[in-house]
Structure formats: structure tokens, C-alpha cells
Image (tube, grey):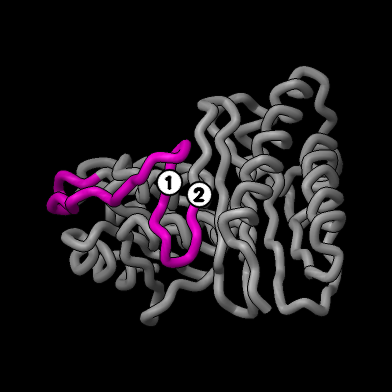
């Protein structure tokens, strides 16, 4: 089944911007609900309202598409296309006002990501990609960094804040921090799109969900970032990204400890 991917990107970008505007407007009145999988897995009423906004619009535009969404508004479909949605990636940052967050929307055809949007509401930045069409930031082309030596590289780190993953992340960071230029902890989607824009030279994501990385991964690849895990392809257990010149050193180092 053919689909106008440029139009799908425009729809996703518009919805991400609308959700981001809602998040900014409701920042002072948000309500935090009960933790989900563990004490640090928090959710707010704004996460849920943002997801409802996105899913309802997609349902209206593409009633036969499946939806996979973090806060439970998913559904099955019969078109062969699936929307993967994280309405607010970085909820802890959003609630505590201690860092950035984003709205993430990806469109899959079967098992292949075809469209991706990551919108950062505070900065007003919309990263996007169509499979095979390059990566964009607010409509302008972006490319990965040239890949400096690891000792000069800025590396992003993302991980789920459950006890087991924090212990695993600690081992990686203890090994990587002394030999890298520096490290930044970020939500997974922004980690990936900052690599796409050349702001980070590489990064890793540990124990994510598909909605955390689906959009960012396509944008990163379209910008020239190499992605992998313990094998040739990345997984939700381990996603490593790096500019081509940095990839051999960073991937070997992370694989040895992650």
C-alpha cells in the first residue's frame, strides 16, 4: 500500500507541535499520577492528554492504522502501517524542570520505520526524517559530526531509571567517562537527534522501549549516524550511535561493558 510519506511527516510534525504547546501551557498545573513499572517511572496527566491529542488525530486521518503508544491508547489495525508514539519522552525532566523533553512520533510500514518526528517544545525545534530522504531540523538539512577521537568526543547517555539498569549504566559510565571528552545524560530521543544534528558525537541508550527510540533512530540514521547494538542492528536493550569516524572506538568500548 503506497502512502504519501511527506504528508505523513507534515501530519506528525503538526501533531507534535500541538502536543508540545499543550505541555508548555499546562506545565504549572500538571498532576503526577502513581508510578508505573517502578518508583522512578512517573507519569502526569499531561502525558496522557498529549497522547490522546495525537492518537485521536491519527485515528481520524488513518482509521485502519495500528497505534503503539506509551500511555495505553494503542490499537490494532489492518493497513500494515503502525504509528509508534511517545507523547512526552523525559517526563521526569518535565515534572522537575531539570532538563529537556520531547514529543516523539514514528510511522512504521511493517517492521521498517518510514517517517519520524521528534519535537522539543522549549527550544521550538522539530527534527524529522522520511526513510531515504535525509534528516531535517526545522526544515533544514542536518548531518552527523565528523567524529573526533573518543578523548575529544561528547557522548550522550540514556537509560531507564530502574535499579538494574542504573547499575548497568554505572558500569558503562565508569569505563567511558575517563576516556571520553565528556558525557551528557539525556532522554533517549534527544540523545539520538542531537547526534543527528552533530551536537553529540555519539551516544548509547540502555533498556529503552520502542517508542523511546523509534523516531530518533530513523532521524539519526538519515543524518549519517551509525547505529548498532551487541549485533549489527540496535535493539531496545542496547542502542549505540556514533559518527562514522568515532564508531569503531566507541562501539567496541560500550559493547565490552554494556
* Pointer 2 residue: 128
Q: Is residue 80 above or below residue 186?
A: below
In magenta segment, residue 147: yes
Residue under the image location 64 percent in, 74 percent down: 2
In the image, 101: left or right of 235?
right
* Mark number, residue 136: 1
Give the x, y percent position of residue 35: 80, 47
- The answer to which quarter of the image holds residue 199 is top left
**Residue 31 shows in this picture:** yes
- In percent of width and height, residue 164 lies at 57, 62
Name the residue located 79 percent from the left edge and 69 percent from the top edge: 66
Q: In the image, what residue occupies the spot 23% across and 48% down?
A: 145
Residue at image position (27%, 43%) is: 154
Q: Which residues are magenta?
A: 129-153
Tell me which corner region of the image, top left, top right, bottom left or bottom right, holds residue 162: bottom right
Any part of residue 171 in sight:
no
Amino acid at each position: 500500500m503506497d502512502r504519501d510519506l511527506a504528508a505523513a511527516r507534515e501530519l506528525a510534525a503538526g501533531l507534535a507541535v500541538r502536543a508540545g504547546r499543550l505541555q508548555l501551557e499546562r506545565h504549572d498545573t500538571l498532576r503526577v499520577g502513581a508510578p508505573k513499572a517502578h518508583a522512578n517511572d512517573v507519569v502526569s496527566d499531561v502525558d496522557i492528554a498529549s497522547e490522546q491529542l495525537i492518537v485521536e488525530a491519527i485515528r481520524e486521518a488513518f482509521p485502519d492504522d495500528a497505534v503503539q503508544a506509551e500511555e495505553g491508547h494503542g490499537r490494532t489495525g489492518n493497513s500494515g502501517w503502525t504509528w509508534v508514539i511517545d507523547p512526552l519522552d523525559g517526563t521526569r525532566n518535565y515534572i522537575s524542570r531539570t532538563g529537556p523533553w520531547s514529543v516523539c512520533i514514528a510511522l512504521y510500514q511493517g517492521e521498517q520505520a518510514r517517517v519520524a518526528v521528534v519535537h522539543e517544545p522549549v527550544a521550538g525545534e522539530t527534527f524529522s526524517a522520511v526513510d531515504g530522504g535525509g534528516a531535517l531540523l526545522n526544515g533544514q538539512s542536518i548531518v552527523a559530526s565528523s567524529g573526533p577521537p573518543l578523548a575529544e568526543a561528547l557522548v550522550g547517555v540514556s537509560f531507564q531509571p530502574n535499579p538494574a539498569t542504573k547499575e548497568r549504566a554505572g558500569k558503562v559510565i565508569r569505563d567511558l567517562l575517563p576516556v571520553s571528552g565528556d558525557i551528557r545524560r539525556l532522554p533517549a530521543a534527544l540523545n539520538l537527534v542531537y547526534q543527528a544534528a552533530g551536537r553529540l558525537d555519539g551516544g548509547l541508550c540502555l533498556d529503552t522501549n520502542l517508542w523511546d527510540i523509534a523516531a530518533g533512530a530513523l532521524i539519526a540514521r538519515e543524518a549519517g549516524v551509525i547505529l548498532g547494538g551487541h549485533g549489527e542492528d540496535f535493539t531496545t536493550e542496547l542502542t549505540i550511535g556514533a559518527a562514522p569516524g568515532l564508531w569503531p572506538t566507541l562501539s567496541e568500548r560500550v559493547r565490552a561493558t554494556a
